Amino acid sequence: MSQTARPTAARDAAAGTAGAAGAAGAARTADTADDAGSRPAPDGAVLQELLLGRWAETRREARAVAADPRFHRVGGLSTAEHRERVFAQLAGLVEEGAVQRAFPREYGGQDAHGANIAAFEELVVADPSLQIKAGVQWGLFGAAVMHLGTEEHHRRLLPPIVDLRVPGAFAMTEIGHGSDVASIGTTAEYDPESEEFVLHTPFTGATKRYLGNAAVHGRDAVVFAQLITNGVNHGVHCFYCRIREDDGSAREGVTISDDGEKGGLNGVDNGRLSFDRVRVPRVDLLDRYGAVAADGAYSSSIESPGRRFFTMLGTLVQGRVSLTGASIAASKIALQGAITYGEQRRQFHASSTTEEEVLMDYQLHQRRLIPKLATTVAAGFAHEKLLTKLDDVFSGADDSDENRQELETLAAALKPTATWHALDTLQEAREACGGAGFMAENRFATLRADLDVYATFEGDNNVLLQLVAKRLLSDYAAEFRQADVGALSRYVVSQAQSTVLHRFGLRRALQNVQDTGDERRSANWFKQTEVQRSLLSDRVRQMVADVASALRSTAKLGPAEKAEAFNEHQHEIIAAASAHADLLLWESFTEALETVEHEDTRTVLTWLRDIHALSTIEQHLDWHLLHGRISAQRARTLTPYLNRLLARVRPYARQIAESFGYTADHLRMEVASGAEAERQAEAAEYHRRRRASGDSPVDEKTLRRS
Amino acid sequence: MSQTARPTAARDAAAGTAGAAGAAGAARTADTADDAGSRPAPDGAVLQELLLGRWAETRREARAVAADPRFHRVGGLSTAEHRERVFAQLAGLVEEGAVQRAFPREYGGQDAHGANIAAFEELVVADPSLQIKAGVQWGLFGAAVMHLGTEEHHRRLLPPIVDLRVPGAFAMTEIGHGSDVASIGTTAEYDPESEEFVLHTPFTGATKRYLGNAAVHGRDAVVFAQLITNGVNHGVHCFYCRIREDDGSAREGVTISDDGEKGGLNGVDNGRLSFDRVRVPRVDLLDRYGAVAADGAYSSSIESPGRRFFTMLGTLVQGRVSLTGASIAASKIALQGAITYGEQRRQFHASSTTEEEVLMDYQLHQRRLIPKLATTVAAGFAHEKLLTKLDDVFSGADDSDENRQELETLAAALKPTATWHALDTLQEAREACGGAGFMAENRFATLRADLDVYATFEGDNNVLLQLVAKRLLSDYAAEFRQADVGALSRYVVSQAQSTVLHRFGLRRALQNVQDTGDERRSANWFKQTEVQRSLLSDRVRQMVADVASALRSTAKLGPAEKAEAFNEHQHEIIAAASAHADLLLWESFTEALETVEHEDTRTVLTWLRDIHALSTIEQHLDWHLLHGRISAQRARTLTPYLNRLLARVRPYARQIAESFGYTADHLRMEVASGAEAERQAEAAEYHRRRRASGDSPVDEKTLRRS
């Protein structure tokens, strides 16, 4: 298959051959306005360029690498063999020039940060273990040296990291502390006598854990520890430290063990490190944000220890960004596989006694796969904005504090959304292919097993959403701080009115009068961009305002009481962050639509955007009803309208999935190979011939009927 | 740990040491009525006997076997090694007398059908591959001979199946047909000359697939094929057929291949079979429900081919029943693991600067795990009813057609519910343990990978729910057929009024007036058993009525139009079946509560039942709002009330999980070993000592503040 998506489904659709049942179903509904004319024919090339986005060329290069069998996961390997295969693949990536993009030009790189992540995330379709192992080496270990070290560190340490002469681990997480990095237990106490730090694991819980490259391949490590000098703990800093001798044995004072078998990603050699008073030269503190002079004096360009810590961690945001993109890539190939199979696989006679139905013509199958397709497209557009922001920050185009914080908040919102979405999509795709979906040859199950941990690494998803929520709450508070008293009191009055309206259902009641019984008017309302925007954005705003108002009364309480009050709203707080992410996806999709000039392409993508919006709204319909945003009358028409939209988009589902631009070399799924269509044709031909020959047995059922 | 649950949590709770934050949170709420007195102390022994249920003794025996390391999954095996280990374990099960219970006494069994499944499902905690491989040998292959064969078959074939001299495959599913068994393509045409059937795979799609025991170990197979004699196809029947020679090579005419690596269950040797005009002696048709005389004359005790087919398949319902029970068992150990860890693991300082919070004290953690615990308990009680019905049918205590159909409908409702619940629970438990949850040593990820396929095997979950829905629709129609005209017209009138009420929100509006602002009254309403019952049962009834009324207008249309109309409501239909399953779980929990005499135990279990009910209602709150079943006023209090209930049950969560009766030998999870508590104690002691010694470094943050 070429890079240009084959517009199979669209051609079929235009000719009226595919999806007849679905489309016919849609045509017979109350809402016929859009269906009346001839069916639109999206332009495959336009669609593909749009979906490939700003780094299309880089993605094509990276996908050429990912299509190479050398880099593919192969089944049946032992853990040890899989680890060695992946390590060898890293060297292959170096040869291909596939991993250097983010590094400075003087070390063989291109200073290209957005492109680097775009390329990196495509590795997931070859083998997620390869993606993560490469991420450990260059995205974490190398990136820590680059972002937390200074020129001297770059010159001395980067070259052998970039070309893999020195494989390394990123030793941040401890058994006792994952998401709460600030509380890690490892200490690095400065000894001015020897001008060395003493790296130490003071208790078992401070053992570094889950470190890729630690169990087998890492020679060095970047180790995060509490920097203590002159009796003061300056918080978490990063130290460059050798962990293995040239013969591969552990360096004296370093204890290395293997994390063993995992739920997935078994090509990555995760392991544990602990330190028994290991000496690290003073110059091996990566001291861009915090330095220790020979005499032990501490200095930093960032005065606040809290801001310093978050700045250091913030330079490592790309991990979250790349997991977002990789999750979207995995969702894309899963959907292409399941939709292709769903168009070929037949099961159960419904409308004909001789021909069984194609799965994609079942309403339930459409509901299972098409909203996931819509959300995958939305997430892709949102990720594009995230990559652009990352590129702006790291290229220096806009590295203001404000923009850095926005980048972090955006990454913290999208990473949970995209990683959970990928797990749900892989699962739905696997189940939609029945038993075949469970076979390793179709990759859904193994991809899901590998991506499972994406939900908790580089920041636990719930913890990230809580970070987003805190940002939303503080933005909300800042709005009030800036507002004059008049604005504030007007807001309070309008809020109070709004509460009254909701409390007594008056706003809803008014809508009832306008809406009675007119399904078409209701559908016309739901499909308006501004209606969708206000439903999704009002929800975030109101949820944040509600939590803020509930917490305002605790402002004067002690820390324990405050913490308890916060905890009593934790569920709402995280739901608000999640609503914010929903809005981000919708906004990104809507902005992307505005750039599409080809009319038929825009028409079909607009339906898809509407499916994304209305599925999201349907999931939280209770909220919209309770808060008077949607009347009961309108709400009742939502699901039927969404179902009609799904039937309308169904003939284009495969074309859209194919426009993601992945080819058979990326999918490598029997269900997407066309084999099922061949088997169906063979079976149909067998039945046809038997009927024609006249020697076909008569069904006992038919006999009894006659 | 002994078989008696350690009432650790309860003791802690009574002493006020554990879950103080959670419980304190609850105590400060508006709804203090139940919190005011002293805290109840459930009786661990009572709880455990209740949760172990009718087959407690059998479960204890089976768990003793499952606790034996011989039967455990071990990590790091190749697929070939894992398959051999599991096959050897089957022989171990024969030695233990662990698999014979369901067979007739004359073949070493006990005719004990409920007990057999109860014991069988416990194997999942040793290794799901062992459970499934045993299920293939005795629950499918052996059971087909037993249920579809006659005395002669039993005498001749059962003994070597029971004692594993003859391992066998159950060849039903084909590449082209899974859930739609009636349409399989394999043919068995009778040849009166030789008095043999000719078993044949006429096209690739008719190849048997995903058959456990086929790839390596099976010598024989029971093969499902279209029985053709005298030019008539009598539909699917089951044939006993040798597939391998004594040297393990495929029998002539039989092609065997390996399904290869799967997403899980890699201890089971799934493979494919196809037949090239393989001859099967006439006597090897398992002919209990359909026989062929020497001259080719077909006879059956069941006249209708449709009913005959469903009767044959119905005898194999135990597969679905056992997957339900195994899924619940897996959910139980996952929750015990995650809750134990959640009580020991600390993360983030919230209310104290020196001590971090225990995870279970976070509201979100309670919301993630406790409703799953409640639903697991509910599902366990529902499964108990299912097992009892299975025992009644297969023991002959009540094997009426009506009861058989009820058994099948109940199994079709509970299997999807329990299997999906297990996948969700394993995933939530794994994420709740962070990175540790992903390690194979904690088993969440591997159990989830193994159980993944439970959602689509023994009947695709969605297809099963559709079966349930069809039964609900036909029961509903039957009600009308039986009703006189007066009853019918009264019903129509009441429906019409009800529609008017909902349409204009009048019923809701009336509730608003009563409810205004009184949260306690609202909570008192939600916790009433009859309120929960009517919310859950009205939903099923109304959904079924709505679909029935939408489909009624299609009664006179042709099959294609009818199929299309059905398809346009497929999503609603399946949602109705799912609502029915929700009701079944709730009813089972409520009935079980009525048997609990110990007051404190009943009190806590009632809270847990309320959590199950209100979580279910919360998930579908939009429906209850749209249909006027809950007013907006009351609906707004639902989530806060549920959150308070969670905090109230939180101190008992571990005791309840431990009362499932699994011990460390069953859990085999590092997170549940107590190691985390030891690490926390060690870290706390380290910090305490450093603070006391005075040589603790000062935090830079503290310095700056002072």
Image (cartoon, coloured by chain):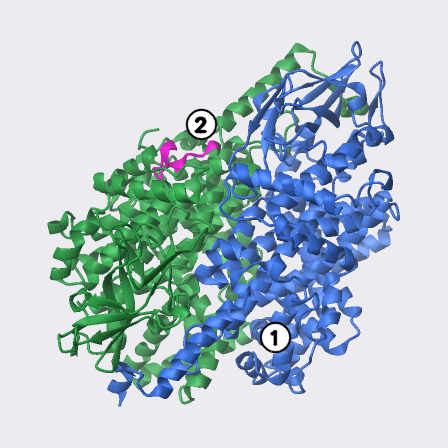
Chain colours: A blue, B green
Q: Confirm whether the magenta stretch covers residue B149.
A: no
Along the line of sight, the residue nearer the viewer: A394 or A654? A654
Which chain is home to disc 2?
B
Is residue A358 visible in this depiction of the protein? yes
Task: Please tell me whether mark 2 sits on a helix, a strand or a loop.
Answer: helix
Q: Which chain carries label 1?
A: A
Task: Residue A567: name its quadrant.
Answer: top right
- Residue name at image x 51 percent, y 47 percent: B427
Mark 1, other Cα within 10 Å: few <14 / some 14–19 / many ≥20: many
Q: Which amino acid does label 2 sit on?
A: Ala
Q: Residue B15 carries which label?
A: 2
In the rendered structure, the answer to whether residue B48 lies left or right of residue A109 reads: left
Residue at x 59% of width, y 84% of height: A16
Mark toward the viewer: 2 or 1: 1
Image coords of residue B229 (percent x, y): 22, 78
Q: Mark 1 is on which residue type?
A: Leu
Q: In the image, which disc is placed on residue A645?
A: 1
Q: Is residue B218 left or right of residue B146?
A: right
Residue at 51% x, 66% y: name it: B623
Image: magenta residue range:
B658-670
- Local packing at callout 2 (Cα closer than 10 Å; few below 14, some 14-19, many 20+) is few
Camera-side residue of A163 and B290: A163
The vertical placement of B378 against A377, above or below, is above
Mark 2 and mark 1: span between their CA atoms?
58 Å
Q: Are marks 2 and 1 in contact (CB under 8 Å)?
A: no
